[in-house]
Image: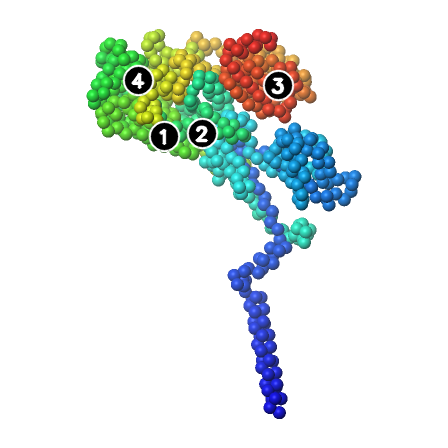
């Protein structure tokens, strides 16, 4: 009986436990039903994630344009070549969907992908892979290369579409534009120049599509989807003029023949401070990225500027009422803090006026004026001009430079540009005071930033006054001194090699020593930094020019001739000649629009004007021209014309200038690489040969004697 009662009690306990468990389970179910999370896990999101997928909608990176709306940087379609290896893809043996003949496939792809057939075959023989990427040669290929591969009709070969950054002009204002490339997150990101500085505005914002998927991962038909559209990046328009930029690039290529270490040249709008061209060497092609130096010389090179600073030390003395140009002084040498400071002609020129001292680039004249000013006044004047501080131009990594003066010897050397440091862009800003009645202008390089989808201008660059540093009378006097330095018959004047008969260029030369690793200054004819600061035309300046070259292996005359060639090209392009002897307008021709006109009529018109038509293609109608309508050129200029032809023959281009062969390449829209300097001596596509528009034209330049010899043999 007792045993029976125990069993009943056990059953009662068991029943109670079961009931409690059911109660707990019920409570848990209710909790799960009403609670958004359980143990920190969002169950609704987890369930949804098992049947939803997300697809990224990539934004389009904004393009970069010059002042004439020419594309400098853009996104273009690119493709990655893949090979399907999984045999199950093929359900119909007569229509294979995977790689069948691996040896033949590797052989035929090899020349197109620039990869060995053996290496491609090793990729195709990989086991347990559904597909394989044929890299590196198959990554980032162009639409034309894709079409060439498709023409092979190889089973199992396919493409993944993507985009890449393209720079149509190659090595062209490269430090200004910079470059962008795809990062580890798959986003194209800027890493130098405008591409880096304005990366946030250029890159836009990716969108996404969230949709329901089936068990195989495919989008389910008829089901709703959530779309967040991509926001495309803004387009950026620079103040650069590609025509002026080309003149500067050619100048740099000519300089490279003089065994230089580096060089930079910049042209700015005299009235606004807008940078219209800037080139340097070493440089790089942003499509290839063989970069030796990551610093932009325009903003990041700091060096002792030399005697171009006499423009500003003389200006300071004039502005402070401490200058009389007819006053005389003994040239040659002066002692400061027990240091002897000499003129470049250590014996001097006897007793001369201070005006003559400027044109002769006399250090002792500058020192005497600086001593009258004192350290505080000269330092203050330099700083008002913008030295020792960033200009704020819209480029990354701008440096300050220094103009500190403590000792009298430092004051003395600062007067002729030694012992202080500056950047090219600071020199440009200081020179704007000469062209704006004594007011400096902030240099800028962004013309505008535009939303490509709406056309809204979200930012616009403009003329910005910085400081009033001098009176109009002071500026007039300095310009007169710079005029005497360049446009004089005095054989001692240091700027006479920059004289041009096309217009009145005024300026000041500079030659500065630099310190070596041992802390000592360099010595010798070629171990220095040569520079030139100028404006043109004098009476109504439109442009400022500043250049500097380290270790120039030529003469002052060589550098002067190369520089004035740039100035003359710009003057003719912009029709700003101001000398009466050369204002015969019959020498200046205005280009018309020749597109859709007959080839023969255009040739006749150009030849009658004294221009040289270079026609490519045997078509009858002009479809493209190298020079745009209203461009000003001089008699004897080559005008390149493209016809509606099936094929194009390379002209006899040996002996052409580098700008002319580049104009031809741009007309045909083929890529090119240039090596050497001077004139065209060799081409990878021989004259008379059919031009493959998908190829890269290799251009070799050489000095004139070699070119002339080759040209005579060719012709």
Disc 3 and disc 2: Cα gap in Å? 31 Å
Q: Answer with mark 1 or mark 3, whichever residue precedes in sequence.
A: 1
Disc 4 and disc 1: Cα gap in Å? 22 Å
Q: Mark on residue 477?
A: 4
Q: Which residue is mark 2?
A: 293
Disc 1 and disc 3: Cα gap in Å? 51 Å
Q: Which residue is mark 3?
A: 685
Q: Are marks 3 and 2 in contact (CB under 8 Å)?
A: no
SS at badge 1: strand
| Residue 560 rendering spot, x and y as whole percentages | 41, 14
Q: Mark on residue 465?
A: 1
| Residue 583 rendering spot, x and y as whole percentages | 46, 11
Q: Nearer the viewer, mark 2 or mark 1?
A: 2
| Residue 333 rendering spot, x and y as whole percentages | 24, 15
Q: Residue at x 36, y 30 (%)?
A: 465
Q: Answer with mark 3 or mark 2, whichever residue precedes in sequence.
A: 2
Q: Residues within 10 Å of mark 4 (few under 14, many from 20)?
A: some
Q: Residues within 10 Å of mark 3 (few under 14, many from 20)?
A: some
Q: Answer with mark 4 or mark 1, whichever residue precedes in sequence.
A: 1
Quadrant the N terminus occupies: bottom right
Q: Nearer the viewer, mark 3 or mark 4?
A: 3
Quadrant the C terminus occupies: top right
Q: Residue at x 32, y 10 (%)?
A: 492
- Tell how many labels: 4
SS at badge 4: helix
Q: Are marks 3 and 4 in contact (CB under 8 Å)?
A: no
């Amino acid at each position: 009986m007792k045993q029976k009662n125990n069993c009943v009690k056990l059953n009662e306990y068991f029943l109670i436990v079961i009931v409690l468990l059911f109660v707990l389970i019920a409570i848990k179910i209710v909790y799960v039903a009403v609670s958004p999370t359980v143990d920190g896990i969002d169950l609704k999101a987890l369930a949804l994630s098992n049947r939803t997928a997300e697809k990224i909608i990539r934004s389009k990176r904004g393009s970069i344009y010059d002042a004439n709306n020419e594309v400098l940087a853009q996104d273009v379609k690119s493709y990655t070549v893949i090979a399907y290896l999984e045999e199950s893809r093929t359900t119909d043996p007569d229509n294979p969907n995977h790689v069948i003949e691996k040896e033949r496939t590797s052989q035929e792809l090899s020349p197109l992908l620039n990869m060995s057939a053996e290496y491609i075959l090793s990729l195709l023989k990989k086991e347990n892979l559904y597909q394989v990427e044929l890299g590196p040669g198959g990554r980032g290929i162009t639409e034309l290369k894709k079409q060439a591969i498709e023409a092979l009709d190889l089973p199992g070969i396919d493409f993944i579409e993507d985009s890449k950054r393209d720079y149509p002009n190659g090595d062209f204002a490269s430090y200004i534009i910079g470059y962008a490339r795809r990062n580890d997150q798959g986003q194209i990101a800027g890493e130098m120049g405008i591409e880096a500085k304005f990366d946030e505005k250029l890159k836009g914002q990716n969108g996404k599509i969230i949709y329901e998927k089936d068990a195989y991962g495919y989008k389910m038909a008829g089901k709703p989807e959530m779309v967040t559209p991509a926001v495309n990046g803004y387009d950026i328009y620079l103040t650069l003029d590609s025509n002026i930029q080309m003149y500067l690039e050619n100048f740099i290529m000519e300089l490279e023949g003089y065994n230089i270490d580096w060089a930079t040249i910049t042209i700015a709008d005299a009235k606004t401070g807008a940078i219209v061209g800037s080139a340097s060497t070493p440089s790089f092609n942003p499509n290839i990225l063989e970069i030796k130096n990551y610093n932009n010389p325009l903003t990041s090179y700091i060096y002792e500027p030399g005697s171009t600073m006499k423009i500003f030390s003389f200006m300071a003395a004039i502005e402070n009422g401490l200058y009389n140009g007819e006053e005389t002084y003994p040239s040659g040498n002066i002692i400061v803090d027990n240091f002897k400071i000499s003129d470049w002609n250590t014996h001097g020129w006897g007793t001369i006026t201070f005006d003559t001292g400027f044109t002769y680039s006399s250090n002792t004249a500058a020192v005497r004026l600086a001593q009258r000013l004192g350290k505080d006044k000269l330092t203050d004047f330099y700083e008002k001009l913008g030295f020792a501080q960033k200009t704020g131009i819209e480029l990354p990594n701008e440096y300050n430079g220094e103009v500190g003066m403590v000792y009298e010897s430092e004051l003395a050397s600062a007067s002729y540009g030694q012992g202080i440091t500056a950047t090219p862009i600071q020199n440009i800003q200081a020179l704007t005071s000469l062209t704006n009645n004594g007011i400096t202008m902030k240099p800028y390089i962004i013309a505008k930033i535009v939303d490509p989808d709406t056309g809204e201008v979200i930012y616009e660059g403009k003329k910005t006054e910085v400081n009033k540093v001098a009176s109009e009378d002071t500026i007039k006097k300095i310009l007169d001194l710079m005029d005497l330095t360049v446009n004089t018959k005095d054989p001692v004047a240091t700027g006479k090699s920059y004289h041009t008969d096309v217009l009145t260029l005024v300026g000041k030369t500079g030659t500065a020593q630099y310190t070596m690793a041992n802390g000592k200054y360099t010595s010798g004819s070629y171990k220095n930094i040569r520079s030139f600061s100028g404006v043109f035309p004098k009476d109504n300046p439109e442009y400022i020019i500043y250049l500097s070259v380290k270790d120039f292996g030529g003469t002052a005359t060589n550098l002067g001739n190369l520089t004035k060639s740039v100035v003359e090209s710009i003057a003719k392009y912009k029709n700003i000649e101001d000398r009466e002897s050369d204002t015969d307008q019959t020498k200046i021709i205005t280009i018309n629009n020749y597109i859709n006109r007959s080839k023969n009529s255009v040739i006749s018109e150009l030849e009658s004007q004294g221009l040289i038509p270079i026609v490519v293609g045997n078509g009858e109608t002009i479809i493209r021209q190298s020079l745009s309508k209203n461009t000003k050129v001089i008699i004897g200029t080559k005008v390149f014309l493209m016809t509606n032809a099936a094929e194009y023959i390379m002209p006899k281009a040996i002996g052409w200038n580098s700008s002319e062969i580049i104009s031809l390449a741009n007309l045909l829209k083929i890529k090119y690489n240039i090596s050497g300097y001077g004139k065209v001596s060799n081409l990878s596509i021989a004259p008379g040969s059919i031009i493959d528009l998908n190829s890269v034209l290799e251009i070799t330049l050489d000095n004139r004697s070699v070119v002339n010899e080759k040209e005579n043999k060719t012709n």
